[in-house]
Amino acid sequence: MDADVIVVGAGPTGLMLAGELRLGGAHVLVVERLEQPTGQSRGLGFTARAMEVFDQRGLLAHFEGLEVAPLGHFGGVQFDYTVLPDAHFGARGIPQSRTEDVLERWVISLGADLRRGWEFLELQEHQDRVEIAVATPRGVQRLSAPYLVGCGGGSSAVRRAAGFSFPGTDATRTMYLADVAGCGLRPRFLGERLEHGMVMAAPLGEGVDRIIVVPDRAPDEERERSVSFAEVAGAWRRITGEDISNGTAHWVSSFTDATRQVTEYRRGRVLLAGDAAHIHLPAGGQGLSTGVQDAANLGWKLAAQSRGTAPKGLLDSYHAERHAAGARLLMNTQAQGMLFVGGPEMDPLRALFGELIQYDDVKRHLAGLVSGVDIRYDTMTGGHPLVGRRIPPRVLAGAAGRTSTMELLHPARGVLLDLAGDAALCAAAEPWREQVVTARVRAEAPQALADAAALLVRPDGYVAWAAERARDAGAVEGLGAALHRWFGAPGAAGAVQGGAAGAARVR
């Protein structure tokens, strides 16, 4: 075997997954067909929940000058996302190239084996492993590992080779994206609809504008394709009457509103994450952010499976939890597409939506949907309001001083928060000390963690179990059941942390 897990694709999803696997103790090999990162940045930020995921691993400090945008939109209708606690429209102005650079440096520091210029060709799944063929600068080579994860984007070769079903809706239009200099465009932050289509423009600094052009015509084809700046400038002129052909394009691309999701995120020893599992209209930075969350959900589970410590059904919970989240992503981006780029026939719906969004309940619902902070997994462990939800970022105080919920998750291990000094709960968790850290802390404001007496938090930051009262007679039994379900048998063998095992290198 060449690794415990082979990851195909070194975009944000593949890199995040590689880091999570390394923290979980798995030897991971990443193959990427590009010899160097493109430097292109379709995404210019990430959502509130993705920001929390990065914070859980101590990565936010690497995004210098990071700022969040409280104001956002849904389908072009603007509102304040902070009406929902912990929500915002996301970190803005962070090019995807910067996100990839931060993640690549992180995974290399953890000992991931990243091989650039290695293109996936085909796979064969065996009873105990997956074998793949890759084209390398030295010819075709074969690699094998117990598990393979496709993170190669919407055109995933792994998805096709493994035979995943990818149903959905075909594209209704082709859209163009470009960063252009020297055009002096007036901002159109939320888009401007005209007779022949819709355009957006936003300044990126130093005379560069990000533009999106949405012609009102049927697409030439569903898949992304090569496009010239002359084609983009022509479409811009047909819609706006403005000539930008004398500008300079730093890069151009095209995309569509095709919406698809695989029927299963796992087929035997092959799994998919990010755009390989779901494609949709880009809206609100949700694509990159959802891929990062897929990786955070899958990484610790697949690492435990690789170590042989995973309880029965743990790896299957990846599909159960993330397929549902992906379906809501597709639903909300399709709805935004209708509002955002639809023609005059959508004007009555836009008017009605503009009225509905005046209600705070509607704002809170939409803010939670787009930001990702409303995701709730079915853990079947009680009705406490935090169970199944992500642990919110909160400051905590303990004997060693101040810490935070995010800081305690940096090692990517489970965390038992003993918030009421319950020695019996701490003793019950002791046999799982290799997988779960016990923190005797208190929240600076009890309501900050919904008045819980204790919380069991999974490595991905989601609450698996909660005690609502201190020294509850049934709490020890409930905690034990939750520990068994998510972390397996107590004292299970296998290193939890990746440490320095495996040489860090890029080929």
Image (cartoon, rainbow, N blue to C red):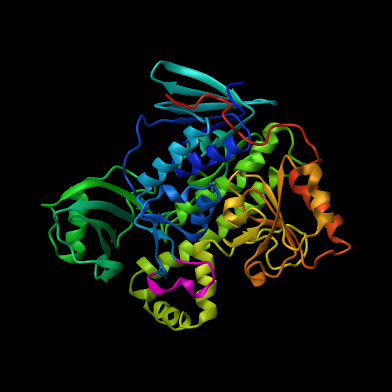
Q: Foreground: 215 or 56?
A: 56
In this rendering, the count of numbered labels is 0
Residue farthest along the top direction in this orientation: 138
Magenta extent? 76-88
In this image, 467 relative to 282: left or right? right
| Whether residue 39 is situated above or below residue 505 in the rendered picture | below
Q: Residue at x 77, y 67 (%)?
A: 468
Whole-percent x and y of residue 257?
Answer: 40, 56
In this image, 57 relative to 33: left or right? right
Q: Residue at x 32, y 38 (%)?
A: 38
| Whether residue 45 is situated above or below residue 413 in the rendered picture | below
Whole-percent x and y of residue 215?
Answer: 28, 60
Q: Residue at x 68, y 48 (%)?
A: 414
Residue farthest along the left direction in this orientation: 246
| Whether residue 81 is situated above or below residue 247 in the rendered picture | below
Q: Quadrant of the N terminus?
A: top right
Q: Quadrant of the C terminus?
A: top left
42 part of magenta stretch: no
| Whether residue 495 is situated above or below residue 278 in the rendered picture | above
Whole-percent x and y of residue 106?
Answer: 47, 38
Tell me, yes or no, if residue 335 can be seen here: yes
Whole-percent x and y of residue 479?
Answer: 80, 54
Tell me where residue 456 sits by quadrant: bottom right
In this image, 310 relative to 53: left or right? right
